[in-house]
Amino acid sequence: MSLEDAIETIIGRFGKYQSWVLFLILLGRYPTEFQLTNVVFILPSVNYVCKDDNAYNLTNHCPCRNPEYDQSTIVSSVTSEWNLICDRTSLASLSQSMLQVGILAGSLVYGYVSDRYGRKISTINAFFFTALFGVLAAVSPQLWMFIVCRFFIGMSLGGTMLCAYILLIEISGKSFRPYVVGLEGISYVTGYFAQPIIAYYLREWRYLILVTSAPWLLVVAYYWLLPESPRWLITVGKKKQAIDLLTYIAKKNNRPTENIERIVSELDSIESNNEQRGTYLDLFKTPKIRKYTIVNVLVWMCCAHTFFGINQYIGRLDGNLYLNVMLSAVVLAPGLVLVVLSSLYLKRKVSIIVSFCTAAVPLLIFIFLPKDMPTATLAFAIIGQLGAYTSFILTYLYSCELFPTVVRNSAMGLASVFARFASFVAPFVVNIGIEWVSILIFSGLAFCAAFLCLFLPETKDIVLFNTIDQVEQPKERKTNDNKTAYLKQ
């Protein structure tokens, strides 16, 4: 059998131990989710009365050296503390986008570290540094220090989003992968929902970041709690550690342990004939991997730009800020169920194309809605956000299944890098000042992503490949490999 089949046979598709790992990862991810969604509360668009002598108490007048900010919704924000208004609004956009620049760098760094040194150490580091730099951002006395901290928070976020997800996928059986994509999103949806509740009671930005970061410094204890990926251990030739880990997990899941050493030994002999560790260069050396890499990068760019653009735009809609964000979080919850159902019963390409279209079409309708229909405006914006969110989750799963183990994190890291270029631009697109132009860009890119997916292969129910050679083989050899057991039980 293949490596994936063997591991599922040894430890089960998703037993007690995998459930424990899922719990740890969901808990450790909360600072990540808070940092991804707090921008509307710490860097909001603010109203003010200008107290300059020549301004006559005009509202939102520029230029203005002595603004008096409206504190009815948010008492203190980065925007108000450092006067990021008028000719300084670009600094507000920079502060928002610096998080995406950090995620870009983190995707490269953590993608390499994870493939080179393991899923465990990269995941724990990402968790810890997200919390640490969150605390440092909250106590920053200068704007430039806050922006630097935002960059390093972003680096850790990039690692968390890649490495924790890959670790979950690699300890789960093939038949459970559709459920993992939904379960892994629980922390984002619940964190997104909790954020406005916390922000409602903590209306000063420093306290908000501290409360959503400092408690998670305790994730250093994960060094003794999280396992390494047994798939990675086998792929890089760490046979004894793989045997010990698989035996431990099998016992926790009440699985038989008699044949583990024999199975791992035969798997190790198979993998030793192939490349053991991949690099970013390997993504461009062979034709199929090169094609998948290029198309995948473009899909991620379109997806990220649309998702983060809509996410920031909702904070600018009319109505109660806290309620709007809570409603958008509530609507995302059914999205997790939809993702699982589509992963189970639809082809990957069909489900991801439908998701992108669900993001694009409501945004087109949004452009033509009258301004005096705030409820309808919010509804279509949230539906568009739901489509963008489900497409993002499915894109993660699709990418995992496209690429082999030796370059899986590197491939997703590279795609995430280019996605951050698009995310970096998103706040500037939101701030264009012509609403229909911003929305049309988000919608058009979602349609582009749906079209690009047509150039990728179907991956539903495949056994995860482990080497580049397995991907590059002709289709008939792949079929034979999947049908013919690597191991004779």
Image (spheres, rainbow, N blue to C red):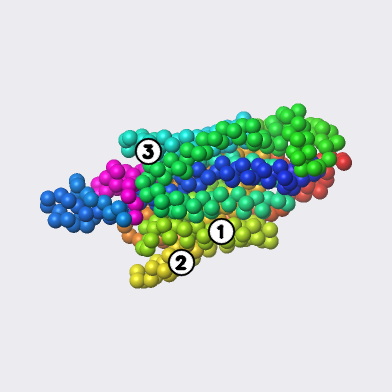
* 273 lies above or below 182: above
Task: Using a 10 Å C-alpha cutoff, classify the residue at mark 1 as few (fewer than 14 neighbours), some (14 to 19) or many (20 or more).
Answer: some
Question: Is residue 160 something that shows in the picture?
Answer: yes
Callout 3 touching callout 1 (CB < 8 Å): no
Q: CA distance from mark 2 to mark 3?
A: 33 Å
Q: Which residue is mark 2?
A: 379
Dot 1 corresponds to which residue? 333
Of marks 3 and 1, which one's residue comes earlier in the chain?
A: 3
Could you tell me residue 452's position as x and y percent?
55, 55
Our reading of the magenta stretch's main secondary structure is helix
Query: Is the Cβ of the residue at disc 2 closer than 8 Å to that at disc 3?
Result: no
- Mark 1 residue element: helix
In this orientation, which residue lies closer to the viewer: 29 or 282?
Answer: 29
Residue hosting label 3: 147
Label 2 residue SS: helix
Q: Range of the magenta residues?
A: 73-97
What percent of the width, then of the height, locates residue 230? 71, 36
**Residue shown at 68%/46% (left/top)?**
19
Crowdedness of circle 2 by 10 Å Cα count: few (<14), some, many (20+)? some
